[in-house]
Image (cartoon, rainbow, N blue to C red):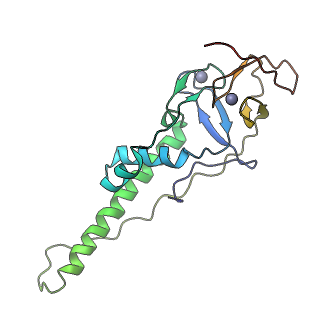
Amino acid sequence: MAWLELPRDKAGFVRRECPRCQRNFKTRPNRHDPGMLQRLLAGYFPFENVHEAYTAEELPAWHCLYCGHRALPDAWLTPDQSAHVERMARSWANHVRYEQLAYVQRTLSQNPHPTFVSVPPEPLPRPLPPDEEVLRTLPMLCCGEEVQASWDWDAPLVCPRCGAHHGGLSGRRQVNLEFVQE
Ligand SMILES: [Zn+2]
Ligand SMILES: [Zn+2]
């Protein structure tokens, strides 16, 4: 489903927003993002084929980079991203409905008195614009990944993927590993 993607910045990072503290950070696109988006779409308009393909997929929870809050992947959309998914879902549903009507019309082409005329739907919404804001790129040594944090955050960080706690940055570029028992 290439037409539904979260926007990236120039360096390829995707913005996430914590459902608890509402702070923003960025990660690389995740291989579970498409499954998460499909599941959200299916939640708006439950088409059976989507349900079968994606609701069974096990999606690992994420941790907030700042407050450590843990939530399933579909909880991390920003308000813009979330509104976009909803627009896409509605538009997609119109397309599906149109295709279904068109199919019925084709199969009833012998019918000299069609009882309805289907109107072509609006094109799908345009993708969200690329994310222009540049945040502070930091390595998460625990998982060998990079994340982006806000510039003014100087307190300890939590790895979004594995939940490992990292010491405060206080001007240092290097993130010290500091595993804390949960
Ligand atoms: Zn948070
Ligand atoms: Zn990690």
Residue at horizontal 36 percent and vertical 43 percent from the top: 43
Residue at horizontal 58 percent and vertical 21 percent from the top: 21
Q: Quadrant of the C terminus?
A: top right
In this rendering, would 99 be left or right of 136?
left
The answer to whether residue 138 is above or below residue 12 is: above
View extreme (right): residue: 172
The answer to whether residue 92 is above or below residue 45 is: below
Image coords of residue 75 (percent x, y): 49, 33
Image coords of residue 140 (percent x, y): 75, 31
Of the pair 156 and 96, the residue shown nearer to us: 156
Ligand 2 shows up in the quarter that is: top right
View extreme (top): residue: 181
In this rendering, would 118 be left or right of 130?
left
In this rendering, would 88 be left or right of 104?
right
The answer to whether residue 115 is above or below residue 162 is: below
Residue at horizontal 49 percent and vertical 41 percent from the top: 82
Of the pair 137 and 23, the residue shown nearer to us: 137
